Image (tube, helix red, strand yellow):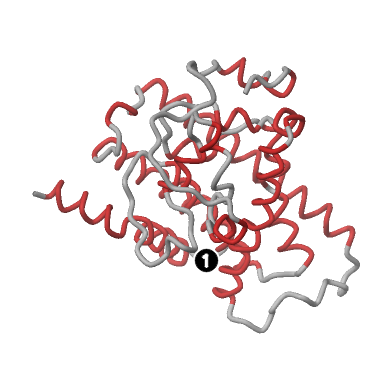
Amino acid sequence: MTTNLLARTLRSAGQPLLLSAALALWAALGADAKAMPVSIIAVLATLLVLEQRNPRRRDWRKSGAEKAALIGAWILLGALLGLVTLTHERWLATLVPPGAHLALWPQALPWPIQALLLFLTADGMYYWVHRAIHRWPWLWRISGHGVHHAFHDLHAVHAGVTHPFELLLLALPLASLGTLFAAPPEAVAAATLMLSANAQIVHANVELGCPGLRWLITTGADHRLHHSMLREQSDRNFACNAILWDRIFGTHAEGEVAQTGTGPRQPGMLALLALPFRKPGR
């Protein structure tokens, strides 16, 4: 009965509950940049447990060795993403003289509302980058985006596993907004947490409901379709976190996914790292 109750709760409201819990933990730990990694790790740990206990697809379960390798890559790439983001922010700060930040950001609004605006706007910027990656084979290749799409049997940990080259693009939207508009640090940190936590949620092999927010926020059903092995499905739902942009610009789609990946076989790690240097095979 407990298992059935958990499954029903997850299916009915799992996504907003997990996002709320992540923000609550972050607030309890001090609501600053230092508390953010702990909250992100807590979300991933929760999803890993749920994937083991209540998987959406039992045939998508990973072995212990596979999980360990992916978690190792997730930790390494997460640290690298933080370094890339910091580098972007410092570089962008040199382009804007002190006191000359663009006066377009609604600084007077409460910072939680600013965090939501950062969440939506940053994902809106990446929507166009992501769409361009899928549109132009040369950008797909040099960004290494094929690494992120190559995995069969999608899981939460895959959210943070991509080619190091793509980190340069992933870090740019929020770093640009936060630096050029001088957004409050707590708003930037909260937006970063929401983007990271939701990215893990939509990759998870768990059925998580999102009542009342599906028009605005990307769900697992939306993002699994984007990872489909079928090209006509994977060239949809480009907004990783704010599906609003796909709905506005006509790229949203729904449907069932038989398998994720880019081909009948999942490449090994060395082959994945070499993808930017090889002719695309999609």
Q: Nearer the viewer, residue 73 or 127?
A: 127
Q: Is residue 263 left or right of residue 84?
A: left
Q: Is residue 196 left or right of residue 19?
A: right
- Residue type at the position of mark 1: Ala
Q: Residue at x 54, y 73 (%)?
A: 112
Tell me the residue that label 1 is attached to: 31
Q: Residue at x 60, y 33 (%)?
A: 162
Q: Kindly indicate the quadrant of the structure image that contains residue 234.
A: top right
Q: Nearer the viewer, residue 141 or 182?
A: 141
Helix, strand or loop at label 1? It is: loop
In the image, residue 187 above or below residue 234: below
Would you call the spot at circle 1 few (<14 residues within 10 Å), some (14-19), or many (20 or more)? some
Residue farthest left in this picture: 1
Q: Position of residue 23 (x, y in %)?
A: 45, 63
Q: Position of residue 43 (x, y in %)?
A: 41, 49
Q: How many marks?
A: 1
Q: Kindly indicate the quadrant of the structure image that contains residue 67.
A: top left
Residue farthest bottom in this picture: 108
In the image, residue 241 above or below residue 81: below
